[in-house]
Amino acid sequence: MGSYRLGLYSSQRGFFTLIGLLVVLVIIGILMAMYGLPGGTGTGSGGGAATVAGGAKERAQDVVCRNNLNQLRTAIGVYNSTGAGNPPTLESLNAGVPLACPVGGEPYEYDPATGKVNCVHPGHESF
């Protein structure tokens, strides 16, 4: 009887073995499910909390939103320290920071009387 190989490549005949091919197909299926590619069990768009990559993208956008707010608050503090009071609008700061939430696109809420800036996106109220 001949010997059977379980590897991906059989050097005797130069072809993929059935077991090796099945292993590759299972790995591709798992990757498709994780990243939400068409044919996988994910969302199909590569985003959303249902996929690993989508969850990481949302967390990264949350960090970007928090960072934008911190930069705006610092710019408001610097503007205020010049003795001019709080800026009348966020646009007048010219801080070079996006003025909208990267997750939902809602503009940041700013109160010139208090100098406070907040994100109105659900879940970002504590930022």
Image: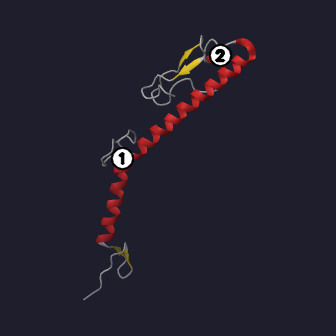
Between 107 and 66, the one nearer to me in the picture: 66
In the drawing, does residue 46 fall left or right of residue 87?
Answer: left
Identity of the residue drawn at 33% across and 79% down: 5
Count residues near mark 2 (Cα–Cα under 10 Å), then give few for <14, some for 14-19, many for 20+.
few
Nearest-to-viewer mark from 2 and 1: 2
The residue type indicated by label 2 comes to: Ser
- Residue 34 in percent (x, y) is at 37, 50
What is the number of the mark on residue 112?
none
In the drawing, does residue 45 fall left or right of residue 57?
Answer: left
- Extreme-bottom residue of the structure: 1
Position of the N terminus, as image quadrant, is bottom left
Q: Are marks 2 and 1 in contact (CB under 8 Å)?
A: no
Q: Earlier in the sequence, mark 2 or mark 1?
A: 1
Q: Which residue is mark 1?
A: 37
C-alpha distance separating marks 2 and 1:
43 Å
Identity of the residue drawn at 36% across and 60% down: 27
Whether residue 59 is situated above or below residue 41 in the rendered picture: above
On the question of residue 94 being in view, the answer is no
* Image quadrant where residue 55 sits: top left
Please, what secondary structure does the residue beneath circle 2 have?
helix
Q: Which residue is mark 2?
A: 92
- Residue 89 in percent (x, y) is at 61, 14
Whether residue 101 is situated above or below residue 39 in the rendered picture: above
Count residues near mark 1 (Cα–Cα under 10 Å), then give few for <14, some for 14-19, many for 20+.
some
